[in-house]
Image (tube, grey):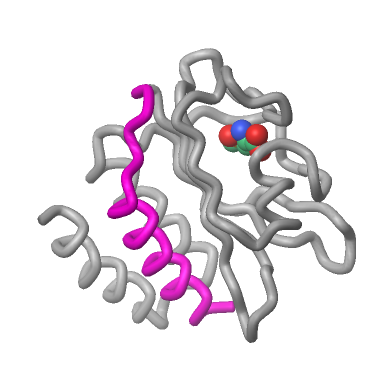
Amino acid sequence: MKFETLKPKIKHIISQDHLSKDERIQEICTILESSIDYYNWVGFYFKNGDKQELKLGPYVGEPTDHTIIPFGKGICGQVAVSNQNFVVPDVSAQDNYIACSITVKAEIVIPIFVNGENIGQIDIDSNTPDPFSVDDERFLEFVCKEVAKLL
Ligand code: SME
């Protein structure tokens, strides 16, 4: 299965101590976007210091204006507050949603925890409607745990 094949590759990227933290996270974005056809924008947001806002980190895909997202705003901002996975099969059905591109149909956001604290998240946009399953959630939880080892 695709996710099982990707897991050792993710671990390998994380273990590359000669690369910076951001370089390794960037490589993770690249491998995810290029390996899964319905992952069309892959990025990480992190808590911006002591502020109640998220700041965009490494990503692959179209540039976005939303480099800072206040807690509570959009899908990402809601996950910063809820500490829960947020799977959106149809972004047009969401009231509290920040559109980055008109091609996006669905979104998944999974929080990253360090010592029990929600310090950021992986955010994936898809141009395919309703593409995400529980397998994506379990796999991306794995990715977030690996990334947390760097933080
Ligand atoms: N759609 C997100 C904003 C970030 S972009 O997808 C890159 C949201 O509603 O929080």
Q: Which residue sits furthest left?
A: 1
132 versus 31 height, above or below: above
Image location (x, y in percent) of residue 41 = 45, 36
Residue 129: percent from left, percent from top? 37, 23
Residue 85, image quadrant: bottom right
Q: Quadrant of the N terminus?
A: bottom left
Magenta: main secondary structure: helix
Compared across the picture, whether 117 is left or right of 135 comes to right
Q: Position of residue 75 (x, y in %)?
A: 65, 40
Q: Using residue 5 as the reference point, say whether residue 142 is left or right of it.
A: right
Residue sitting at the far right: 51
14 and 105: which one is in front?
105
Residue 53 located within the stretch drawn in magenta: no
* Image vertical order of residue 147 relative to residue 78, above or below: below
For the residue pair 36 and 74, the one nearer the viewer reads as 74
Residue at 73% of width from left, 46% of height from top? 77
Residue at 52% x, 56% y: name it: 110
Image-based side of 133 in relation to 92, left or right: left
Question: With 112 as the anchor, is 81 left or right in this view?
Answer: right
Q: Read off the magenta span.
A: 128-151
Q: Tell me the quadrant of the picture where the C terminus can be found.
A: bottom right
Residue, x 45% and y 55% (percent of image)?
26
Q: Is residue 92 above or below residue 7?
A: above
The tally of labels here is: 0
Q: x, y (%) of residue 21?
A: 52, 71
Up-down: is 88 above or below 54?
Answer: above
